[in-house]
Image (tube, rainbow, N blue to C red):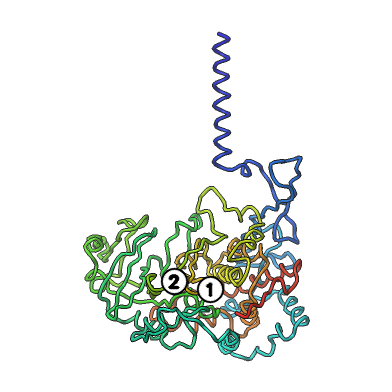
Amino acid sequence: MKLKHRFVCVVTFTVIGLLGLHVVLFTGLPNLIPIDPVVRNDAVVGLRDISVGEHPHLRAGRKRLNKSNFTSDADFADANGTLPKSPRGEITHGRDNGQSFVASEPKTGEKDVLRNFKNTKVDKMLLLLTEKSRKKFDLSKFDSLDYLFFLKSLTSRLRKNRNTLPVYHNYKGDTNWERFHLGINQYSLYSPDDSSISSLLKDMNRMPIVDVDMKEGGTQLKLIITFEDEGQALMKPMRYPRSQETLPNHFYFVDYERHNAEIAAFHLDRALGFYRVPPTTGRLLNMTTEIKKFADRKLAKTFFYSPAGNLCFHGSCSYYCDTSHAICGHPDTLEVSMATFLPPEEVANRKTWRNPWKRSYSKHRKAYWEVYDDLCDKVRERPPYNQGRRLLDLMDITIFDFIIGNMDRHHYETFIDFGNDTYPIHMDHGRGFGKPNHDEMSIMAPVLQCCLIRYSTFIKLVKLYRGPQTLSDVFESFASQETIAPILTKPHLTAMNRRVAIILQVVDKCLEDNSVDEVIVDDHI
């Protein structure tokens, strides 16, 4: 009997031991150790020193990010600790127990709510920068200058020798999409003065369609549209009304893509003077005569009429291509985005790079940078980030993604012909503009961890912060020309201006522990 009991005990403890080993192997040892960061009012990142005696398997002095400090909402306490009211007049409580990056509460009135997000710390930082270098940071002389003229004067300092793609050196384009390809250069996808871009947008908005194909790969349906001049565009259909926000319980990687987010990203890219997003516009399509008529058999057989009498289809893709996720017209009119194709890779090959700050795309695991804040030190040591412009380009992408609320930046591409001294192409923004009342501070992790921003980008943001034109004003000057305008609702326009102020607060925080020349780097781009 005793032997039987001993046998049962041995088996029980063996099973428990194996289960424990399974947990360690599959969840990671750090997840088993509760390391609660100390929240300090004067720090962006909560720090907790882990002594060797306490946990000898963890390197002493490692910093862990305070995740509550990497999340912010639209409403925050002000500098005196007073909780502001939301636009609905409710008292709201921020998630942050430490210092938040916030803009002060706007003045009352619809127009003022859109525009005024001032912060005393940012104002003080700008004053100190002006005193340090009036030539570089004093923008008061530009206050009366229109932002687009200011942007043109700023970008004119770029090197004049803009190398274009070698394959087009001896080629003259006959169509607008060919002229766009001809204009792709080492520093931008197009020049803001290129008249063929506006003509290309009109072509994608009006030109007759002659062929429709499904794009292979991806979790959601995308169609390749061919026009009568043989130009092509990537079409994303409307799934959401403009006012519908990302559901609070949805992860960033399961959200539907928004067609208007692609259009808005293009116009925002123009407003920021990056010119790295392929030309994109909106269009109203007749699903019967412009999609189904030219669809192949595989796509055509997915068309059906809904109980409401609307024409629908779902196509084929990895996840959201079935009857329950169908795309429906009203009754057969569908709003879509059209993004022009880049040159074929056979003639202008591109290299795909993994974003160092890529997310885990898991419900359970976090990426390294979400747990530890030393990733930038590692990134700075390896090419192409150890020299040249690429790390500053990543900071530009980070700022762009923070303004649109895009958490889905897993990879980026560059043209191989231009080597490493070129920009990353900004593509695939369908998961942006989902939460206008929530500022996802984790997107800003690269800037926070590297404490780095490009001088030209910083100056643009300062100009937009000072006014009189705000980022939403400049954005609307482009987006209002769309045939399916308005592209964004007012809460998203408000969020743009609010996030400009928050980015400048991040820079101010970095300047507390680093010199101006280390944080704000002028690479003449």
Instruction: Report the amino acid beneath label 1.
Output: Tyr
345 or 475: nearer the viewer: 345
Q: Name the mark nearer the viewer: 2 or 1.
A: 1
Please state, as top left, top right, bottom left or bottom right, where the N terminus lies in the image.
Answer: top right
Where does the image place residue 178, in percent across and percent down from the top left? Answer: 37, 82
Q: Is residue 104 visible?
A: no
304 or 158: nearer the viewer: 158
Q: Which residue is mark 2?
A: 262
Instruction: Report the amino acid beneath label 2.
Output: Glu
Question: Quick check: 367 above or below 207?
Answer: above
| Residue 226 in which image quadrant | bottom left
Q: Residue furthest top?
A: 1
109 or 24: nearer the viewer: 24
323 or 222: nearer the viewer: 222
Q: Residue at x 28, y 70 (%)?
A: 212
Tag on residue 423? 1
